[in-house]
Every structure is written in structure tokens, then in C-alpha cells.
Image (spheres, rainbow, N blue to C red):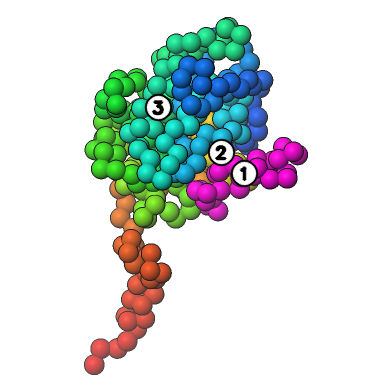
Amino acid sequence: MSGKKRSSKPSKPPAKQFKALTRRGPHRVLAGNLGIVGIEGRVFTPAEGTRLPAIAFGHTWLSGGNRYRDLAYHLASWGFVVALPQGQRGLMPSDVGLAAEMRSALGVVCSAPLGDGGITVDAAKVGFAGHGFGAAAAVLAASDELLLGQEPVPTSGVVAIFPAPTTALLPAAAPRVTAPGLILAAGTELDTFDANARPLARVYGGDVVLRTLPAATSRGLLERRTWKTILGANGADKTTHRQVRALMTGFLLHTVAGDTDYAGFGDPQAVIGKSLVVDPSDEPEHELDHISRLLGAKPREQRGRIARRIPVP
């Protein structure tokens, strides 16, 4: 199965924890602006607490932190300080640039009192997460690379949600990440032009679990303002958002917050919701190359079966 190391046995079954983690946590949440310290973006934090765990979250291509407000709010309700840098939103963004901004944003929340001054972060409990292009940036941020003057950050956990290929630096830096990782893929999108979940899992340096989410889509994670927003809806695809927020929260509670009750979310043997664990080392049968899939070609499995029925003269 996927994963290089099995986690210790959790005290509670993750299948039961999953449902609870789809709902808001016990903490009241505050929101603020990172602009007061010179970084474009927002920060969400529990209304009280000291030495809290913290996460920097990277957005996908042509998006921004505002498309993940509900996701960040959810994490904060479970006890995390969440920084959402807003840079690199143009047509030609830099994965290194966003990764550096994520490190910078994390450094700010770790060093500055938050809220009314009584909320603090434990610098030993930090992690990175991201979606699509931002997932690549999260992996880069967790590596030992020097990024635009930003020093490496000791990292406890990484979550790559529907990761997308970016530059050649990503596969070079991923093997040097030592933090445990969770990689989430949309349905069967494991290795395509705009999805690289399986290749990333293969070269990832730390213990890694690769899970696919049936019926989920990468675009489905993005939140949108609609008329339902006034009723509390976030505009994202419900199936996608529900699975992602529960799996990500459970994994980060274990790896970053250090709560062993959630160790099952880092166990490749655990059955959690409808997610399916994939072994990244497996070679899929009858898989088409990227060009063939883009052109709509079908796998040759069925044609092979027909050919075997033709008698040889």
C-alpha cells in the first residue's frame, strides 16, 4: 500500500472521526489582514489560545486566498492559525515566489502576537498546504531549498490537494522534504497534463499517503459567491469540499498539532470515508500517455481482449 512508514495505532477509529471533522470545530474564529505587516493576504485564528499550530495555504492558478475562506475558517475552528498569502495570481505565476510568500507569512504569524495580543503560535508546530499550483508551492516551501532569500522552515506536515505540475524545481526539491505528506487526487486524475499526484508521491522524501477522492474535482474546491452565500453556502462543490476539509484537518491535527488521536489519518492502511489509497509505486495497466488522453483516446484493454478471441489459422 501507499506510504513509506505506518503510523502508530490511533486511539479512535478515523472512520468515525471523519464525520465529525466535516463539521466546524469547537473554537470561535477571528479573521485578520496580513497587509499590516506588508504581506498581501489574510489570516484566520482561533479566538484564544497560546502556542497554537499554524498552516500557510497556497492558492491554485488564477485564484487567490479569498477562494478558500471557508476552508481556512474550518481549520481555524479546529485550533489552527491559517495564513493565506495572496500573491502570484497572474497568468505567469512563480511557484518559487508563492512558496517564499508562504514561508514569509508563516514567519509573521509565528513571531507576532495575534488577535488582542494573547494569541501565539508554536514555531515547532507548523506546516504547509495548498491546492493545484499552490500544492506545488507548499512542497517547495517545506523543502530545504533557499527560496528568494527565505530560509527553510522546520515543517511538521504537508498537504498537497489536487497538485499540479509547475517547474523542474518541484521534482528536484520534493525528495528533500522530510515532513510527512498527504496527497489528495481528484478521482482518477493521478497523472495528467494538469495533475501530478502520483509522480509527486513517488519522489516525495518523507512518509507519504496518496488518496483519491471519488466524485471530487479540483475546481470543485474553489469557493464562489452566489446568492446562496447569504444563507451560509460557500459555493464550492459539497462532495469535494467535505472530503478535503475532513481529511486535511485530521492529518494536520496528527502531524502538525501532534494529537495522536488522529494518527489514523496518516496511516495508509486506514479506511477513511470514501477515499481510496493508491500505492504510487504501482504501474497502472493500459494507461495512455498524456497526448493520447488529451486527444480522447481510449485504453487498449478491450481491443486486446477481442484480439485474443480471434483464432490463429
Q: Residues within 10 Å of mark 1 (few under 14, many from 20)?
A: some
| Residue annotated with mark 1 | 224
Query: In the rendered view, would you say 117 is above or below 73?
Result: above
Indicate the amino acid at tag 3: Glu
Residue 291 seen from this side? yes
Query: In the rendered view, would you say 216 is above or below 140?
Result: below
Quadrant where the N terminus sits is: top left
Q: Residues within 10 Å of mark 2 (few under 14, many from 20)?
A: some
Q: Which mark is residue 49?
A: none
Q: Residue at x 38, y 69 (%)?
A: 295
In the rendered image, residue 303, in percent from the top left (x then y), is placed at: 36, 77
Task: Answer left or right for 40 relative to 27.
Answer: left
Q: Main SS type for the magenta part? A: loop
Residue 157 seen from this side? no
Could you tell which of marks 3 and 1 lies nearer the N-terminus? 3
Query: Do residues under tags 3 and 1 come within 8 Å of each other at their CB atoms?
Result: no
Frontmost residue, 172 versus 307: 172
Is residue 296 on the magenta stretch?
A: no
Q: Residue at x 52, y 9 (%)?
A: 113
In the rendered image, residue 275, in percent from the top left (x then y), is placed at: 51, 46
Frontmost residue, 287 versus 88: 88
Q: Residue at x 52, y 17 (%)?
A: 36
Question: Which residues are drawn in magenta?
Answer: 212-237
Query: Do residues under tags 2 and 1 come within 8 Å of each other at their CB atoms?
Result: yes
Q: Which mark is residue 67?
A: 2
